[in-house]
Image: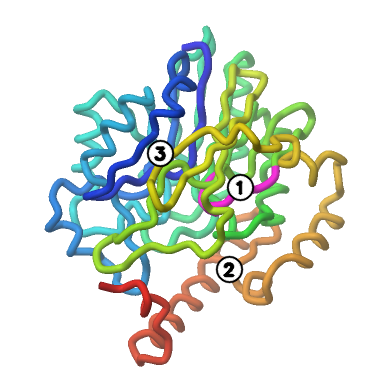
């Protein structure tokens, strides 16, 4: 393989046809890597058996395998907050991928995929930093940094990729803890950091010559019914997304547009790619960035959703605060005092 293309969140449910023909040529000479945002359910009846009813439960139908194969996506991360949304055994997804010559990894945090790339050993570490509510053990930043240093010490020519599921959903700025952690990863020896989860594009930073793409946005994630709930994003920015082509050193960004009405994915030729580098064009300090973040964040995000320092103690605090918030939300829903899905339930 000459190049790798990193993609964001990939979902393709039953009864949805996605037109991605416009982007196929980009993948002809590259190998793709994507975040498979949910299990592959083998039949429609499984859709009616989510583990939780107070959230959107994402999944893909077996049709997603056609997309994966045609785009030459050889590796999919399962390290995300939707991978255990359904009662179907997740190992069925792993085996189905394997039987189609697709490697998956990430069912445990800090999981490592090792492959050959242009004569180098390529190590891809996937992790979920946002205290994944349902699926994974908490991320330990010190452990990740130790893994990077260990790989670099034993294999100086290795290429190391950090592929995290992190950040605040539908928010345009990386969490302060994630920015600091990304810098720490580069200082430890990482060659690139490419994030996903927020569903919108976040800024790109070049730190000490190393690219950090904080959020690609979605890749393929139709706004349709998942079970009895219709997924609807009110922000039009959700339809804009990035993919990153990487040759082991340099990156090429392509901005895509996913039409929520037609489920057509196409290259956005009119996009201003340079604007994604604007925020971090000047190396702003951590404290100055924190002020920018706080200025744009909601009070709820500031108080309960944002992580400020990358360490295991703060991961535990984040875990407790997010689960407390979710518990209160669940109580309000059950009491009939809050119905976020009222307009989108069939």
The answer to whether 128 is drawn above or below residue 213 in the figure is: below
The answer to whether 299 is drawn above or below residue 15 in the figure is: below
Q: Nearer the viewer, mark 3 or mark 1?
A: 1
Which of the numbered marks, if any, corresponds to residue 6? Answer: none
Q: CA distance from mark 3 to mark 1?
A: 19 Å
- Tag 2 secondary structure: helix
Residue 78 location in percent, x, y? 37, 43
Q: Are marks 2 and 1 in contact (CB under 8 Å)?
A: no
Q: CA distance from mark 2 to mark 1?
A: 26 Å
Q: Residues within 10 Å of mark 1 (few under 14, many from 20)?
A: many
* Residue 183 in view of the camera: no
- Image position of 29 (left or right of 200): left
The answer to whether 232 is drawn above or below residue 99 in the figure is: below
- Image position of 328 (left or right of 179): left
For image coordinates 86% across by 56% down, the residue present is 288
What is the tally of numbered marks visible in this picture? Answer: 3
**What secondary structure characterizes most of the magenta part?**
loop
Is residue 202 magenta-colored?
A: yes
Determine the image quadrant of residue 51. bottom left
Name the residue carrying label 2.
317
Residue 85 location in percent, x, y? 30, 59
Work out whether mark 3 precedes mark 1 in sequence or the reverse, and give the earlier one: 3
Name the residue carrying label 3.
77
Q: Nearer the viewer, mark 3 or mark 2?
A: 3
Closer-to-camera residue (14/93): 14
- Tag 1 secondary structure: strand
For image coordinates 50% across by 14% down, the residue present is 117
- Tag 3 secondary structure: strand
Q: CA distance from mark 3 to mark 2?
A: 26 Å
Q: Which residues are magenta?
A: 196-203
For image coordinates 31% across by 45% down, the residue present is 12
Name the residue carrying label 1.
201
């Amino acid at each position: 393989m000459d190049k790798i293309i990193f993609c964001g969140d990939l979902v393709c449910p039953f009864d949805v046809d996605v037109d991605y023909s416009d982007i196929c040529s980009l993948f002809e000479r590259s190998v793709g890597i994507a975040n498979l945002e949910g299990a592959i359910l083998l039949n429609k009846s499984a859709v009616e058996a989510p583990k939780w009813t107070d959230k959107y439960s994402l999944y893909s139908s077996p049709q997603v395998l056609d997309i994966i194969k045609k785009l030459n996506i050889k590796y999919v991360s399962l390290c995300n907050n939707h991978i255990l949304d359904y009662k179907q055994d997740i190992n069925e997804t792993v085996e189905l991928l394997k039987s189609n010559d697709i490697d998956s990894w990430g069912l445990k945090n800090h999981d490592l995929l090792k492959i050959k790339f242009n004569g180098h050993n390529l190590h891809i570490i996937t992790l979920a930093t946002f205290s994944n509510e349902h699926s994974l053990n908490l991320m330990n930043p010190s452990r990740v940094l130790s893994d990077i240093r260990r790989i670099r010490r034993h294999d100086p020519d290795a290429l190391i990729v950090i592929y995290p599921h992190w950040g605040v959903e539908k928010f345009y700025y990386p969490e302060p803890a994630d920015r600091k952690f990304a810098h720490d990863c580069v200082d430890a020896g990482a060659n690139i950091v490419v994030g996903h989860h927020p569903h919108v594009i976040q800024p790109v930073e070049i730190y000490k010559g190393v690219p950090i793409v904080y959020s690609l946005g979605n890749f393929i994630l139709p706004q349709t019914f998942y079970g009895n709930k219709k997924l609807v994003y009110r922000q039009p920015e959700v339809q804009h997304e990035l993919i990153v082509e990487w040759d082991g050193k340099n990156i090429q960004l392509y901005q895509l547009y996913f039409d929520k009405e037609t489920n057509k994915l196409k290259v956005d030729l009119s996009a201003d790619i340079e604007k994604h580098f604007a925020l971090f064009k000047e190396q702003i300090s951590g404290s100055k960035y924190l002020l920018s973040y706080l200025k744009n964040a909601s009070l709820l995000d500031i108080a309960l959703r944002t992580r400020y320092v990358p360490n295991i103690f703060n991961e535990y605090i984040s875990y407790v605060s997010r689960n407390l918030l979710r518990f209160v939300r669940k109580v309000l829903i059950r009491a009939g005092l809050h119905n976020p899905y009222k307009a989108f339930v069939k």
